[in-house]
Amino acid sequence: MKVAISSDHAGFEIKEYVKQLLRERGYEILDFGGDVEEPGDDYPDRAYPAAKAVRDGEAAFGVLVCGTGIGIAMAANKVRGIRAAPCRTPGEAALARQHNNANILCLRGRPPDREQTLAILEQWLSASFQGGRHARRIAKIRDIEIAEGGARG
């Protein structure tokens, strides 16, 4: 299974750690950058190609990392069909999958916390979409995207 992964400079260390964890679990990595730890590596530039890969089915899901996980999620969510969730706890990661059918996990890179990252990633990987009433809500999100002509603004 392929995973799209990317980061800005602030998320580089955690991105590399997540790549290692995913490879150990047998995932194939599609790395869309964030190969430097210097400022100027902007998160929108890193989010877009990874989000497109998930949208287009080149990857089963994505993991994106910036300083807070918030900015890179905002950028990824501009791509139609993407439901990127910034998760700071294992519980949030599980619910993002179970209730929101999130297809991109967004993590914080500052401060780098490998133990917390591992716990979040494990919950993300073990959770699955529950459907039911949650499917109705995901359909409403899709309807908004269509009404707006795609994710913009």
Image (cartoon, helix red, strand yellow):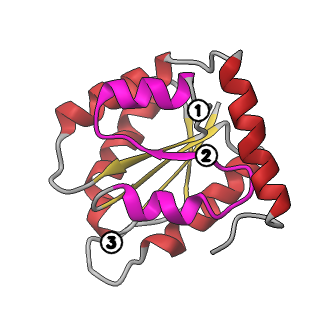
Amino acid type assigned to the residue bearing label 1 in the image = Asn
Q: Which residue is mark 2?
A: 83
Is there any visible trace of residue 56 in the rendered image? no
Kindly tell me whether residue 88 is visible in this rendering: yes
Mark 3 — residue?
36
Residue 77 pos. (x, y %): 60, 58
Quadrant including the C terminus = bottom right
Most foreground residue, 16 or 110: 110
State the CA–CA distance, disc 3 to disc 1.
32 Å
The secondary element bearing badge 3 is classed as loop
Q: Amino acid at mark 3?
A: Val
* Residue 100 disc label: 1
Coordinates of residue 66 in the picture (x, y in percent): 35, 61
Quarter of the image for the N terminus: give it.
top right
Secondary structure at badge 1 equals loop
Span of residues in magenta: 69-98
* 3 vs 1, front mark: 1
Badge nearest the viewer, 3 or 2: 2
Q: Residue shown at 15%/53% (left/top)? A: 111
Front residue of 149 and 62: 149
- Alpha carbon distance from label 2 to label 1: 8 Å
Mark 2 secondary-structure assignment: loop
Q: What whole-number distance in Å separates the C-alpha atoms at marks 3 and 2?
A: 26 Å
Mark 2: give few (<14), some (14-19) or many (20+) Cα within 10 Å.
Answer: many
Q: Residue at x 37, y 38 (%)?
A: 20
Marks 1 and 2: in contact by CB < 8 Å?
A: yes
Mark 3 or mark 2: name the one nearer the start of the chain. Answer: 3
Q: Please report whichever mark, 2 or 1, sits nearer to the chain's N-terminal start.
A: 2
Residue 111's tag is: none
User: How many other residues sit within 10 Å of disc 1, few (<14), some (14-19) or many (≥20)?
Assistant: many
